[in-house]
Amino acid sequence: MNAFADQIAFLRPGWTDLIEILIVAFLFYRLLLLLQRTRAMQMLLGLLLLAGTYFGARILGFELIRYLLENLFQYGAIAALVVFQPELRAALARLGQSRMMRLFTRRQESEVVDEVVEAVDQLSRSNIGAIIAIEREIALDEYAQTGSPLNARVSSEMLLTIFTPYSPLHDGAVIISGNVVKAAGVILPLTQFPVHDKTLGTRHRAALGLSEETDALVVVVSEETSRVSVAQRGRLDAGVEPQRLREILAGTFEGRSGVVRRPAPVG
């Protein structure tokens, strides 16, 4: 009887066990918050699927599948460090931010929003085309390499100068990371999906393409119509007014979900 009681003792956790469970649950919850809306979440789901397949193979006695997955998992940790490097870097940066640093960062982000909105409004009034990509959790370094590195503080004057007609960087995109213009004259990937609205030009297709491949938010000023559009998660919100653009950008920097509340489908 005593032996049986010892075997089921783990079913009666003590207060230290409950504290450990709460700590682990909290850490797991924070991890999921860091990974949400990033490609890391999709990869994590893929890893969970592989783990389920592995245990299923063990139960059913599929030795070949189990052997292959065991070898895959053996080197999976190193591969994960390489694949998740941008997400891990962003997560560690978040964990290391103090409240004072967050307040300072919010002030900087507010200034960036003001500068971008002012530049976009002037570009729209002047009938000048432009495309501005705002980097979020997924780094845009591989796209920035296709343009000219700037690493200069964001300002409306700089953005207006970059998109001045006939300037060397006019036709490309600008990538903004934090409060810095990372690169200009950047070439973005065009959307691979059919676009039914034939009035959309190359800038809009490039904005959709980048938003399909990353979590970036892309602002487009049409050279033909002067309309401002915002692309996010493969959707395009057209005819965005300055106040609405300010709300979207502020929500993007704050990391809120559902920034584009009523996205209009293309076409």
Image: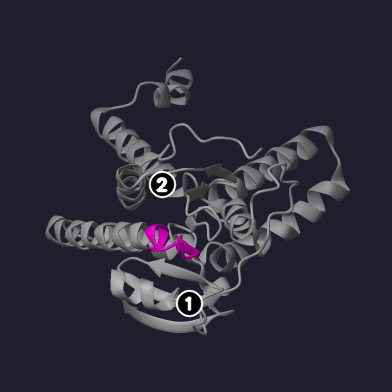
Dividing the picture into quadrants, the one containing residue 171 is bottom right
Which amino acid lies under the numbered mark 1 shown in the image of this protein? Ala
Q: Which residue is mark 2?
A: 31
Residue 82 position (above or below residue 184): above
Q: What SS does tag 2 mark?
A: helix
Q: Which residue is mark 1?
A: 184
Which residues fall within the magenta stretch? Answer: 123-133
Residue 229 image position (x, y, % from top left): 49, 49
Horizontal side of residue 7 vs 195, given as left or right: left
Identify the residue shown where x is 66% and y is 37%: 267
Identify the residue shown where x is 66% and y is 64%: 189
Q: Are marks 1 and 2 in contact (CB under 8 Å)?
A: no
Horizontal side of residue 123 vs 72, given as left or right: left
Residue 167 position (above or below residue 51): below
Within-10-Å neighbours for mark 2: few <14, some 14–19, many 20+: few
Residue 88 image position (x, y, % from top left): 44, 62
